[in-house]
Image: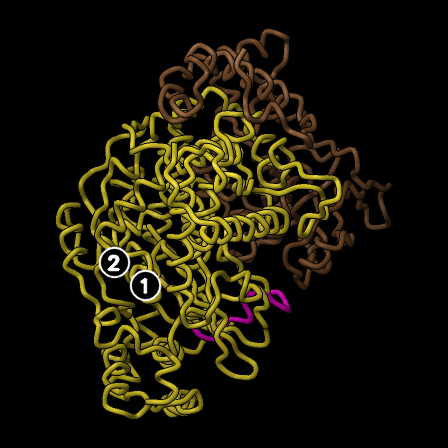
Amino acid sequence: MAKLYIDNDKYAEPNASVVVDAYHGAIHDLIRRKLESAGGDWASFVFDKSYDLITSKDFEAIEKKLLGTGHRFDWSAMISVRERPEAYKPATGLGDDIKNFSFEHPEAVVAPPDAQGREQRGVGDNVVKYPKNLVGIARYIRSSERVLELLTTGVPVETVAIIDDSGGTLTAPILEEFKGVICAGGTVRSHLGILTREYGIPCLMNAKVSGIKEGDRVEIECTANAKTAEAYQTGVEMTAKVWRLTK
Amino acid sequence: MGSNRITYAQLLETNNLIQMSADETYWLCVTRTVQESKLFPVPAYMMLSYMMSYYRYPSLLRKIESRMLAEEIGDRARNAGIKIQNPSMGWALPGFYLLGREWLITLGLIRPQDALQDLIYVMDFWKRFQLSWHRNNGHITNKEFGHRGQFLPERRVQIFHADMYDCSQGDELHEAAQNFMAAASQYGFLISCESRISLHNSGPYKLADDREMIVRDFMDLSESDFPWLDGVAADVPYNNLTVTMAVKDCHVYLVDDWGSFESKPAFTADKLTGVGLYTSDTLSDGYVPVAMGSREELTACFRSLTEKIKDANNKLWRRVAGWSRDQMIDAGAITYFSIIKDLAHVAGVYDVNDWMMVDERAERFRPLFNDEYSRDALVGLCIGTHTSHRLSEYTMMQHSNAPQRLYSLIPYSVLQGDDYTPSSGPIYPGASHLPAKVDRYNTTCGVIKLEEYNRLAREMRPPTVDPKYRYLCETWVKYHAGEPLADELYKLEQANSRLLKGKGSMLKRVDIEKLRASLR
């Protein structure tokens, strides 16, 4: 079998990602075989013969082999799991099951109701400090179908969007209509953080929340200090509370 | 095999440029933000774009330089808010190419000494462009300047300063400008498939003890290069818009090579105390004022633009929501890969097949780019955890102190006979899952076809690169202000200025403030 230049790597270590390790091992084997079949001459292989010898079908076979072991991929974009549900882990909380869905972060800080009937259900990083806390109705916004529905019917007033996408595109046509945002990902510098700041919408990013259901009344402590760049870089905790209102 | 023309000095310099880019890539990726989306498969399209960049950038840059040198384009870049600023040139040109190279090294598909002449050429192009673009500050990147992005000559800063309208929170202009920037930012993320590369901030420029100016560009907003804007963006009247922003009691202490900034205290709407609006492109000969005749005109223009942009945003979102995964990946990968496409527009050699297609050599890898592998491979590339990144245990990388290097250096052993390959080859055919681009380009010369766009670009000879003025730099101005040639230079720039037209070269910052005060 032909040998690759990287086969003699003094400092190589396995990759922390199982999928990356599996893929790269299979790709190295593939290239060794193809190089061998091309006669072993690297100069004529690397930017010439390899273009015809290493094809998309070879990479499809590598994926098929991994899926054959029972592995199912994590998904990040809805379109991926929608087009190939057999290749990805199941998606929940995106359709009719939204009524019973809730984010359940293992590190969510929770507490029993206080004197005002506010039950803490988590914390997040405040994007901008406002003079008053915000109260509204929690609504999960996790799919383009939901966005399209709200774009058609209108975003109900008082909506506090509960989102796990820190990007600025999923909610692009309706973001301006939200009263507040609780985002389970990103940082105050994420695109969603930038946009809510520009629109003047109270927002907590990197929210670790638990037990907030569709339609719950919630309060966001947007009077807390905004999380600073230094706090992120030095690992200092600067959080704002999220309450579910029982009264 | 390569020839023996490569020198030790070339390799030393190229490796230095590679390392500089590696250090900043790590810092940017770790400290800026996580880019994610439930709509777009972002890591998948990023990985594909790096492959496209690796295989095509060397040939495309050579094609551009066959008409115009990198350093001349750098001179032109100082005078327009188009996509040859940050993050395009400050980071992405070397970054995308080197990230693609590193991934292929990790896969075992190339060696650090492969496509060596391509590599030396790409880094040399980058160096010459950057040094020219940064001519007024003398650095090669914002990072080297302590994360500061001052590019403009005094004569342009003075016009931005003088013609800006005061505003304060609660007044109509402030509200209109703020609403415009929110809508344009949102639209920018959508145009660019969740990336921030339609937006760029530069500066700050010191307006007074308590005020600084940020120059914010919104780019590729109308029907131009991206096929997905055909139709939906027809009513957006300008392809590029630049907003000049005065900020009070707020020091912008960091402007990075991605074109984003940090300030103390944090920049919030109440800190905005002045705005101006301009458009520009490769045909405009600099910045053209937009609705700058009066504050009422500017307020109305911001409102009108906001409505048009929101309409385009909603139409585009509906289009994107109906795309297949392959279409989303193509649009994102093309957005990333073509981040430097305006180099070709300036040179007048833009070709849709060069910039809006996925090269077939890159296309081979698409089946690998499921969400999970793409995510993990991308994170590994950006923070240095793949096998090719590993170094001796004694090594301490900048920022992380880990025994890693983000981009492999060229082995010097090629100078004593070790073999290398010179190039990854010419441009191969490409394809796209997206609809074909309509031959319609919204420019400052009207809506025109690409052939005319290229012709006009080739004929364009802005005064700033005229041999008579090109080397009249800030050092020269310091010692020749008030002389006829200096006044001529300033008056050329001042031709469209409301307050400074014909004023010449002797004004200082305090004079600009007095002029502004006299009109309040």
Query: What SS does tag 1 mark?
Result: loop
Residue A132 to residue A5: above or below: below
Q: Label 1 is placed on what type of residue?
A: Ala
**Is residue B272 covered in magenta?**
yes
The answer to which of A93 and B67 lies nearer the viewer is B67
Q: Are marks 2 and 1 in contact (CB under 8 Å)?
A: yes
Residue at x-position 70% and y-position 42%: B403
Residue B50, above or below B146: above
In yellow, which chain? B
Q: Quadrant of the N terminus of chain B?
A: top left
**B52 horizontally vs A193: left or right:** left
Is residue B132 within the magenta segment?
no
Residue B472: x, y in percent?
Answer: 31, 78
Q: Chain of mark 1?
A: B
Q: Callout 2: 10 Å neighbours few (<14), some, many (20+)?
A: many
Q: Is residue B458 left or right of residue B42?
A: left
Q: Amino acid at mark 2?
A: Thr
Left or right side of B249 for B150: left
Q: Nearer the viewer, residue B58 or B286?
A: B58
Query: Magenta region: which residues?
Result: B263-274
Picture coordinates of residue A39, whole percent (x, y): 43, 13
Chain depicted in brown: A
Residue B282 tag number: 2
* Residue at which label 1 appears: B80
Residue reaching furthest to the top: A68
